[in-house]
Image: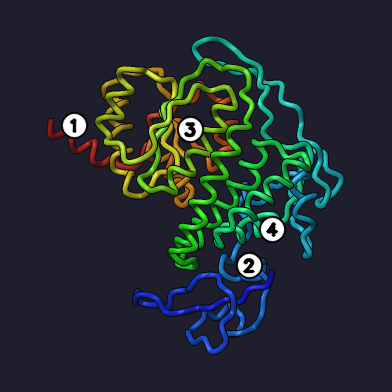
Amino acid sequence: MLFDFFARPRRARGGVGVGCLRRWSPGSAGDRPGNLPAMGERIAVSDVFRAVIGRGWRRSGAMMSASLARVFGPDPGVPRRRTRPGAKDGNTPATPPTHTRTTGGRGGTAPLTYKTRSSAIMTTDQHVERFFEVLINGDRPGARRLVREAEQAGASSDQLIADLYWPTYELVERLFRNDQLSQLSYRLATRLLRVMVDQTALGLERGHARRRSVFAVCGPNDADELGAQMAVDLLEAGGFDVTYAGGSIPADEIMGYVHEEKPDVLLLFASAPSDLPEIRGMIDQIHEINACPDLQIVVGGGVFNRAEGLAEEIGADLWASDPIELVESMTHEPLRRAEPTQRTVGRTRQQKQRRAA
């Protein structure tokens, strides 16, 4: 499917905004960024992505299982592939090593049996592009057809979430934040993706119980809840006991639940920038009161993916950029806690409060 990029002015913000991906309309007028083709020039979706994004895929967005590749077909361009340990060259990904590490929480140890990556990984943009196209058009039958074909080719539910849904979700969010996707296309994509995630989650197989309880919350928007839902679905499949409250939960209610139920992990995933003051306050309160000394505070996704080092500086014990990394980190590092010197955000304010007291 070929698309043309139609750029139209948006609200004045000191520059020209970019419109949404749409079919070319003769006679359309509008300014265009310098790195985009001329108006009316027919270009492929992949070319649009490379022009408007201006950088390569994130780690999670560049991973695709071989079973999905058989459905969506090879990339017409030269694929960029990650070299894994044991690979013979840069274009031949090797089979990931088998995990034999054990982990456990308060209840003891449990073998790592959750399969987090497919045995054969390839890197291509076209897989996500086709799914992205049906999502922004609200093509429900098309989305179900692509997922069904992937399942018939051997893709498991966790592979669909990690290798297809999450990279597409990140792409939709990035384009919308950069004003490169219309409100309508954004709503169509997120609503339809939510449906597909719900349906796929029913096929997840729960792994060995780890006896670690997780209380999860997220940012205030529907898209934040969608991102966090993918994370908690994979956590539950990985053997964690998850309670997911969604977004827009007051900080005092979160703290009340933590003090009463005493979960092993407080997960703040896909948080928005507006959540940062409350997150910082909760971390401060948990450390000062020390009512839950065994609690592990984990953050990831959302604003923490867009501000490098923020998770560490705010005082989180553990952080991850995507659901797969989250499962692996929480599985392998249940005892990791933040160092007192790690916290830099808000340190001056704390010192002033202590001196005033």
Where residue 321 sits: x, y (%)?
53, 43
Q: Nearer the viewer, mark 3 or mark 1?
A: 3
Which residue is tagged 4?
125
Q: Nearer the viewer, mark 4 or mark 3?
A: 4
In the image, residue 184 sits, relative to residue 110, either above or below, namely below
Q: Amino acid at mark 4?
A: Asp
Q: Nearer the viewer, mark 1 or mark 2?
A: 2
Where residue 6 sits: x, y (%)?
53, 78
Which residue is tagged 3?
318
Q: Nearer the viewer, mark 1 or mark 4?
A: 4
Identify the mark at residue 354; answer none if there is no mark: 1
Q: For residue 103, which quarter of the picture?
A: top right
Q: Amino acid at mark 2?
A: Arg
Q: Earlier in the sequence, mark 1 or mark 2?
A: 2
SS label for mark 2: helix
| Contact? badges 2 and 4 (CB < 8 Å) | no
Q: Earlier in the sequence, mark 1 or mark 4?
A: 4
Identify the mark at residue 234; answer none if there is no mark: none
Report the Cα–Cα distance between label 2 and label 3: 32 Å
Question: In the picture provided, is 172 more to the left or to the right than 277?
Answer: right
Q: Residue furthest right?
A: 88
**Is the residue marked by circle 3 packed among few (<14), some (14-19), or many (20+) residues within 10 Å?**
many
Q: Residue furthest front?
A: 141
Q: Earlier in the sequence, mark 2 or mark 4?
A: 2
Question: In the picture provided, is 89 more to the left or to the right than 193?
Answer: right
Report the Cα–Cα distance between label 1 and label 4: 52 Å
Which residue is tagged 2?
50
Q: Earlier in the sequence, mark 3 or mark 1?
A: 3
